[in-house]
Image: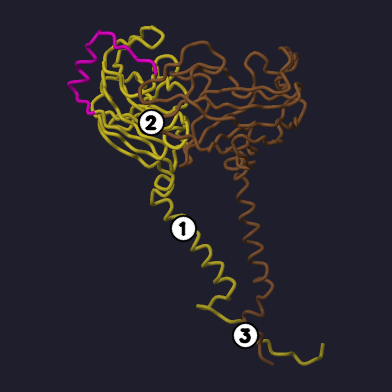
Amino acid sequence: MGGRRVARPPARRLNGLPRQAAFAVLLVAALATGRAVEGLMPVDDETSAPFERTGGVGDRVETRWGDVEVTSVAGSTRISDPYGTVHVTGGVYVVVDWTYTAAGEPQVPAYVALRDTEGRVFRTSVERNPYSSGGAAQPGIPRQVAAAIEVPADAVAGARLVVTLETNPEDHRRDDIAVIDLGLTQDDADAWAASEETVEVAEPADGPEAAS
Amino acid sequence: MRRPGWWRRNRWGLVALPVTLAAALAASSYRVEDYWWLEKPRDLVHAERGEWATFSASQYDRTGDVPFTVRVRLDGVRPAEAPFGEDEPLEPPDGVQAVAVDLTLAAPPDVPLSGCQLVVRDAAGTEYAYQSASPSISQATSPCVPPDARGPELDLFEGIDPDTGPRRPDEWSVSPVVLLPDGVEVAEVLLSWGPPEGLVISAD
């Protein structure tokens, strides 16, 4: 009081705004830009996508955890599972015989599914879609396995077999999955949808493919 | 008076920066233990074939931690004639060899030891596990104890006596069988009663 006022230096200004307000505006703008970029680009899908290793029937598809080779594909409306139980479908059973060779350590390819051209996924299950891995396969020893999957007839043409270790699709992110084009056509779908021949689903076995 | 320089004004922040970075890394690596350290035996005791190794580790059950000490000697690795603890003939498929891992173990008979995993490794580090049931072999569930005198089990279930079988000898030999592709040479045998501890024995 009564003292002389000391002149304060004027606040530094940036574009007419006080420095702190400018900083806040820049910060919010940067966050909003990041959010917008993330929303516009498939960042989540891309960064967490599995690595698809692709091939066709008879190709040895190499992955981080082993090799997958589809040896034959059959189909019908009737299958006989390894316990002898017969299953009948109004759609089509696609029966895939394939060989799996683990790499590095004993591993189980627990996730086996068919993916159709629309992206629909049909998985093996305990009861109606029989598949048995036979447990972990020792590295370097081929394990022959078979999977039968029930699909609608319109899913057959162009269907791909998808194989990987983790049963939960969430856990496929950034890991290898084998995707094998089964080379199926609409003719196969029609023939199999009309077939009543029982296709046997083989038990798992070790060793090179047996002469059949 | 000159204003102090940027480095001087921010000296405490600069001192704190490496500490903060280290703390942030530590805080965000809380899964390393579960997903890496406890995933496989990594805290390894090394031994040589033909010599006794003393291995101490811990298991746990309803009663809490169950520390134990066992002495182990790898006597050799040889072509197997029969599955471990089974009379069934051994018929490995084409391209597959069966090797028996001859081990002698010693521990007091009241120590639960049946819950062990046995893995053999080749020189490149590829691992082949003891499997009691697979499409090509069926043998005793535990590779480390005599199949007919396993000794006590861990006390896992209320109301079930964990020690009912015949008394396990003070020293015993086992010959678990591991299936390998033809041509693979066993370089190491790895025994574990639960990660992270393990005993790795050179087979050379």
Label 3 with label 1: CB-CB less than 8 Å:
no
> Looking at the image, which residue sits at the far right?
A1
Q: Which residue is mark 1?
A: A34
Sequence-wise first label, 3 or 2: 3
Q: Which residue is mark 2?
A: A101
Q: In the image, residue A33 lies at what x, y percent?
A: 45, 60
Q: Chain of mark 3?
A: A
Which amino acid is tagged 2?
A: Thr
- Tell me the SS state at disc 1: helix
Q: Which residue is mark 3?
A: A10
> Looking at the image, which residue sits at the far front?
B50
Rendered shade, chain A: yellow
Magenta span covers which residues?
A183-204
Q: Residues within 10 Å of mark 3 (few under 14, many from 20)?
A: few
Label 3 with label 2: CB-CB less than 8 Å:
no
The reply, left or right, for residue B158 in relation to residue B199 is right
Vertically, is A91 above or below B125? above
Closer to us: mark 3 or mark 2?
2
The reply, left or right, for residue A92 in relation to residue A84 is left
